[in-house]
Image (cartoon, helix red, strand yellow):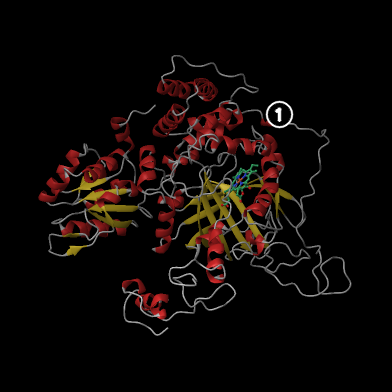
Amino acid sequence: MASKKQPAPSAKAAKSVDDRRGNGDELQQMAGGSHPALTTNQGIPIPDNQNSLRPSPRGPTLLEDFILREKITHFDHERIPERIVHARGSAAHGYFELTKSLNKYTTAKILTEVGVKTPLFTRFSTVAGGAGSVDTPRDVRGFAVKFYTKEGNWDLVGNDIPVFFIQDAMKFPDLVHAVKMEPDRAFPQAASAHDTFWDFISLTPESMHTILWAMSDRGIPRSLRMIEGFGIHSFRLLDAKGRSTFVKFHWRPKLGLQSTVWDEALKLQAADNDFHRRDLFEAIQRGDFPEWEFAVQLFTEADAAKFPFDHLDATKLIPEELVPLTVIGRMVLNRWPDNFFAETEQAAYCPANIVPGIDFSNDPLLQGRLFSYLDTQLIRLGGPNFHQLPINAPKCPFANQQRDGHMQMQVPKGRVNYEPSSLDPSSARATPAGFPSFAEPTDDGAKGRIRAESFADHYSQPRQFYRSQTKPEQAHIASALVFELSKVETLHVREAVVGHLRHIDEDLAQRVANGLGLAALPPAPPTAVPAKDLPPSPPLQIIGKMKDTLKGRVVGILIDDGSDAATIKALRKAAEAAGAAVKIVAPKVGGAKLSDGKQKSADGQLAGTPSTVFDAVAVVLSADAGKKLSKEAAAIDFVRDAFGHLKAIAADAGAQAVLKAGGVGKDAGVVDATDTAGFIKAAKTRHWAREPKLRTLA
Ligand code: HDE
């Protein structure tokens, strides 16, 4: 069709056949630029991407329209089953660089070749919610890394909490059924605060340690860039002689650990469903690449025999005081995926993917996982060839005699699809240098469905965890338990959980009982092993591990017409110099005319950009704007929430009216907007002392 001047076919009455067709050339021209021809999946050029095929202008659509049918069919199949757990996730590409060789312990190249950069793909996730659920529920976060090593893919599929709810894979489907939305009512989505979860927990004392971690501020991270990661299970390293050393893997964020406060996490669920995804995306786009240290805890069988717990039990961690961490490398995430579906959604992690020089331990949870992940990928990705998808394929050569199956993308040549064979000397064979398994002597116990006696102590480590926390963190754990159990309708479930808490710490149990309004402390259930007092371990805190830095944080500045240009400029300069990003918020996204007469555009409109999305805020207003915004709910909430979420607030004289309307008090975190140094100092932390004055904690 000859090109037309008019903008869109619908804009004028159809006169000729060509006009009726309206093939979209005009739209394409408006979009500008040269472009490849649009084709079907068979490569047939498409003449018209706006209208389906009809025998007459107002007639029925023809079944013959193979272009329409192909397009709709593909669309109908666009979704694949979401992950049964960890469905909601965000991922990025990056690299791992080894800084210290472990060649004394392992032959794995990735752990012995210092300075080599290994490409990787890391996916973070929540556990309970569906793929479209919010980013900030109280939940464990998945931390899955696929290293594309020279010796094949190594997947370290971990979490942001170093322990797990259950000891045996047999219980995983029950745990997940209990935490997901209840099957009759189909709610709550992405929330553990409901009866079935706590019913299961109250009957599963081994879950108590992970429960305390999940109820701590670790369950509500500020950013995926500010979480730790743990392989959880013990793995083995194997040297060239086949000797084994146990290892636990840790990721430690360069930006330090940081969490939100619960009220903030709740409000973020309304303000920005994608808060963590957006935060990761924006950080990578601005070149602020998230980075983690990679550390190991190494120990021998003889060391393990002396631990006051069984390291094969995934509900236990090894305190750093017992086995220190050695940093051996770093991970940098520096590239957002080009396509969410092709990469993040189709990424298939599997703890069974390991490389020579690393091996499994007998942790019964790990053993079950070794089966589960491949099995789930077969249904989720539709067949046995998902390893050929670009995101899953190893970046080293791979060859075998496996053939055919759904979506085979390789075209193997020749007659030989079996081994041994003599017909094709170049066909792949097993090699003595292949993956070695540790020649572990098997013990002579009798076969059976047995839980090891050494797994029986369910309360000592939760007690150690609780008693290692700072006062505000202890109050948060107690308050989180009160929040969650208050959503549980069944009284005996609430009481049973408090009964377990009594074994951990009487004061914690009492605080939760008070918060729930229980008339008396419920009885503690019988225990196989009474809790021991273990020495406190400060690295289990978050507050103690927060870094004194503004790096990677985001400062929001609220402005309006007449705001002082010099103050805004000075605040921005100081925040950026301290490593933060700065965003301007104004009642209108077009911005405001500042005191210097220049228009300053905004990054966000006030009504849609609450202070919950920032780490610290400044409010710079003329007297008139201050008066106006002191009657504006979004502005009042902006400062009230920043104060309530224990953030630093810088405000100038004009902003005082808004602060007053928001009930913002005076403390070390509320500073004058001209005191930029004071603001930066205050912004590097949360103001914990403020909290008891404005919120009743358990
Ligand atoms: Fe998983 N887990 N899991 N899990 N898990 C899955 O695999 C499973 C466990 C973890 O970003 C599934 O591909 C069993 C511990 C992460 O794609 C599934 C058991 C830890 C991810 C599965 C566990 C994890 C998963 C669902 C108990 C921390 C997301 C989709 C024996 C060390 C990976 C999938 C991603 C995903 C099974 C326990 C971490 C069903 C049976 C412990 C980070 O295979």
Ligand 1 neighbours mark 1 (CB distance < 8 Å): no
> Residue at the location (48% across, 79% down)?
36
Count residues near mark 1 (Cα–Cα under 10 Å), then give few for <14, some for 14-19, many for 20+. few
- Residue 217, by quadrant, is top left
Q: Is residue 494 left or right of residue 435?
A: left
Q: Is residue 638 left or right of residue 406?
A: left
Quarter placement of the C terminus: top left
In percent of width and height, residue 590 lies at: 22, 61
Please name whichever residue, 125 or 596, is drawn nearer the observer in this view of the structure: 125
Q: Which residue is mark 1?
A: 453
In percent of width and height, residue 642 lies at: 28, 43
In percent of width and height, residue 663 lies at: 21, 36
Q: Is residue 261 left or right of residue 141?
A: left
Regarding residue 98, the answer to whether it shows in the image is no
Q: Is residue 200 above or below residue 69?
A: above
> Residue at the location (52% across, 54% down)?
293
Regarding residue 490, the answer to whether it shows in the image is yes
Secondary structure beneath dot 1 equals helix
Amino acid found under the numbered disc labelled 1 = Glu
